[in-house]
Amino acid sequence: MTKDNTNSSVNIRDICYIALFTALIAVLAQISIPLPGGVPLTLQTFAVPLAGLVLGSKRGTIASAVYVLLGAVGVPVFAGFAGGLGIVLGMTGGFIVSFPIMAFLAGLAIKKSLKSPLLWLWLILGALVNYVIGTVWFMVVAGSTLPAALVACVIPFIPTAIIKIILSGIFGTMLRGILVKAGLLQIK
């Protein structure tokens, strides 16, 4: 019989939650709408902060990093069932590599500011980091100017980014509260 050792830094329950959220990010990545600028609209940027909010900064970051690593080694977890280092090093790679940072910041939000307006500032900061890294990466890889990169990577996504921040904040805090209250998730 396997014991769930809650004193260890990562226990079996943590591994299960990390795997579950890694899978959730991969599944929601497949809900993708291609846009003319080359950057698709996906639900990854909803799932990643959700992982941080529910699991906390450490476990949420690990789930996002595992997702990035799985995709980098060729598992087709990225949008459009794509995978491989070419995707990570491609035009949209900056958005992908910033996912662990985004999850970490969302995890800090839940740790420091649960039920506080600061929660939303942490989520917005995570989205901004994602946009900055993704846009700069896009500019470098595509040889794009800043105005062209903003049109391709930022401006069309602002309305949906606001919606995803709100929904991840609501659902993340609600799901975390339910899991903690049920004794299924320990706060670390």
Image (cartoon, rainbow, N blue to C red):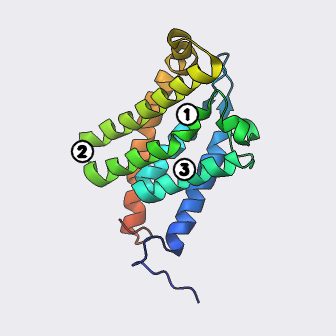
Which residue is the site of mark 2? 116
For the residues labelled 2 and 1, the Cα–Cα distance comes to 27 Å
Residue 140 point in image, percent of width and height: 58, 22
Say which mark, if any, is on residue 95: 1
Q: Quadrant of residue 40?
A: top right
Q: In the rendered picture of this protein, how many numbered marks are placed on residues?
A: 3
Query: Is label 2 in contact with label 1 (beta carbons under 8 Å)?
Result: no
- Residue 49 point in image, percent of width and height: 46, 44
Q: Earlier in the sequence, mark 3 or mark 1?
A: 3
Work out whether residue 54 or residue 146 is closer to the camera in this orientation and state it: 146
| Amino acid at dot 2 | Ser
Is 73 situated above or below 142? Answer: below
Q: Residue at x 47, y 47 (%)?
A: 50
Q: How crowded is mark 3: few (under 14 residues within 10 Å), some or many (20 or more)?
A: many
- Residue at 45% x, 47% y is 103
Q: In what quadrant of the picture does the N terminus appear?
A: bottom right
Could you tell whether 103 is left or right of 24 in the image? left
Residue 175 in sight from this viewpoint: no
Ranked by sequence position, the earlier of labels 2 and 1 is 1
Kind of residue indicated by mark 3: Ser
| Location of residue 120 (image quadrant) | top left
Image-based side of 119 in relation to 164, left or right? left
**Mark 3 sits on what residue?**
64
Mark whose residue sits in front, 2 or 3: 3
* In the foreground, 76 or 118: 76
Q: Residues within 10 Å of mark 1 (few under 14, many from 20)?
A: many
